[in-house]
Amino acid sequence: MRVILEALHPDPPDVKFVVESGSAFADGLGASIVEHGYKLLSWAEATSTRFDVVLAAHATPALDEFRGPVFCLPHGAGYNRIVPESTGSADFATGTVDSQLKADSGTVIPAALGCSHPEQIERVGESCPDAVDRAVVIGDPVYDQICASKRRRPEYRDRFGVGPEQKLVVVISTWGKHGTVGCEANLPMRLLAQLPADEYRILLIMHPNIWAGRSVAQIRSELRNELDAGLVVIPPRTPWAAGLIAADIVLGDHSSLSMYAAAIGCRFLLAADGRPELVPGSPLAMLCAEATRLDARGDLRAQIEDHLKAPRRLSAKEIADTIFALQGESWAETRAVARKLAGLEDFSVPPRMTAVSDPEPEPGRRVTSWQVSVTMDSDTGTVHIERYPLIAREQFPDLDPLSQVSDDTEVDQRTRENSEYLVRTQPCEKPEGEEWLVEVLKPTVGDDAGHLVHSEARNIGVAAYRHADGCVVQWCDGLRVETDAVDAFAAAVVLHEMYMSGDTLESPGRVEYSSRPGLLEEFSYSGATKCS
C-alpha cells in the first residue's frame, strides 16, 4: 500500500488507516502502521467518516460499511490464489469472488477493481459478472518500481553483505502448508551446510502471515541456529523488494514474490509447488508448471550452479507479459483511477518514480566455527579453501566430515575442545600471541591413561595468530612458520594442507590460495623452525 501512496503524488492525500478486525494475521499490524507515522482509526471512527477514496488491499464485504468510493487493488501480483476457507470458492481467485465483491444486498461494493492484466478482467467476468464493468487494468505499481530500481543492485547487495564474486541465494516462502517453509522448513539450513560461505550468501524472505501466525520472537528463536550460521532474514513489515533485485537466484514457491523475481530476470527454481492453491491456467500456475523443480534433499550446490549456467526456458519479458500490462505506466494509471474516483482531474505529468526502500536485513551472530574443505591443485600448487558454518554442517551427519576450525572468540567449550585448528583472527601484540600459543598448545593436563593432553582444546593440532606484520602458525609438535599473511585462518589451513601433502616447509616460499572462484590470493612464509 505504501507504493500506491507514493504513486498519488504530487498531491498526496490526507491518509488514514484502519485494520479490519477478526483477521488471524492482523496481529501487530496496527502498531506497525503507527510506527510508520500514519494515523490509525478505530473501525467505528472509520465507518463514520466520509472519505474521498477508500483504498483496499483486500476485497471484503466489510468495505460496504465505508462512506466513499472503494478502490480495490490486488493483494500481490494479480489474482491467482484460491482461498476457499475465507472466500467460500474453490474455483476462483481471492479478490475476485462474488462473496468478496458484493454486499449482503447484492450490490457490487468496489467502484473500481484494479487488475494488473486484461486476462484478470476475463476471470472477474466468470467469478462475479456484475463486477466486470468495475474492473480496470492498472498494471502493477510494485513491479514497475522494482524494475526501475534495478540500477541500484550494487547498493542493495552491499546492504545484504554480499561481497565481490559472491552469489546471493534468496529463499522465498508464502504462508500455508504448500509454501516453501511449510514444505521444506530446513531448506535454509541445508543451503548453509552445502554452499561455501565465501561464495554464497543466503537470504530468507517470508510472508508476513508466517510471522503473524506464530510470533516474531518465536520464529527468531526457531531460526537461531540458521541466523548464527550466516542466514540473513528480512524481518516482517520491512522492505523486501531489494532482496529480489540483489539476488542471483531465487528458490521460491507460488508466492507473488516468485513472479516478481522471475519477471525481472532473476533465475528461479521451484522449491515448493503450490499449484493446488492456484487458479489453473493463471500466470503463477504457469510459472510453477514451467519452472525447474529443486530437489531439496539432493545436491543443492550442483543444482544451483547447473541452473545458473543453463539456458532460460522463458525470458523475463515472456513471464512479465503474462501478468503485467501497462509496464512502466502503472503509477500513472493507478493515480488516474484514484483521482477520478475522488472527483479530481489528473495531472498531465506522470508521478515521479521512487526507488524501493532500502532493506533492513537481520543477521545473526558472527560465525566463529567452521568445517573446512582444503584441497591442493597438484599442477599449480594452489590451495583451495571452502568454509561451511559448523552449526549448519552438524545438522546433517550424512555430509562428508571435514576439518573443524574455530576462531579464538568461540565461546562454546564443547566446540573449542573438538576443533582441530584454533586461530586468532584479530591482531594482537606478538608477546601476547606467543603466550596464547603456549596456553593453547602446551600439554599440561593428564588424561585417564596418564598422557599429557592440551588443557583447553585437546584436539588442537594447529594454532595461528595475527600480529601487526603477519601471522604465526604453529603445530602441536612444535613446528613453527612465520608469514606475511593478513589472514590467520587462511595461513593456518593452507600451510597445514601443504604440510599434510608432504611439504616439510623447511625452505622459505610463497603460496597461492583461493577461497572463491576466480580470486587468487598469496602470502610468503619463512622456513619452518622447531620450538622446544
Image (cartoon, helix red, strand yellow):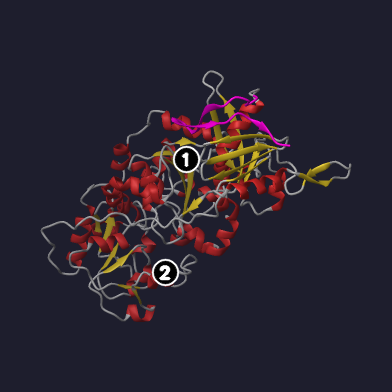
Question: Quick one: quadrant of the C terminus?
Answer: top right
Discs 1/2, front: 2
Give the camera-side residue of 386 and 216: 386
Q: Number of callouts in the render?
A: 2
**Residue 74 on the magenta segment:** no
Indicate whether residue 512 is drawn in magenta.
yes
The region drawn magenta spans 504-532
Q: Relative to 104, is 402 above or below?
A: above
Instruction: Please give left or right for residue 450 compared with residue 205 in the image.
Output: right
Instruction: Identify the residue shown where x is 63% and y is 25%.
Output: 506
Disc with the residue nearer the chain's start (1 vs 2): 2
Q: Which residue is mark 1?
A: 270
Residue 276, given in percent of the width and then of the height, sits at 49, 46
What residue is pinned by disc 2? 32
- Crowding at dot 2, Cα within 10 Å, few <14 / some 14-19 / many 20+, comes out as some
Q: Name the outermost residue toward the right.
A: 449
Q: Quadrant of residue 60?
A: bottom left
Amino acid type of the residue tagged 1 in the rendering: Leu
Q: Secondary structure at mark 2?
A: helix
Q: Is residue 290 left or right of residue 454?
A: left
Q: Is residue 275 above or below residue 305?
A: below
Whether residue 3 sits left or right of residue 19 in the image: it is: left
Q: Is residue 336 left or right of residue 357?
A: left
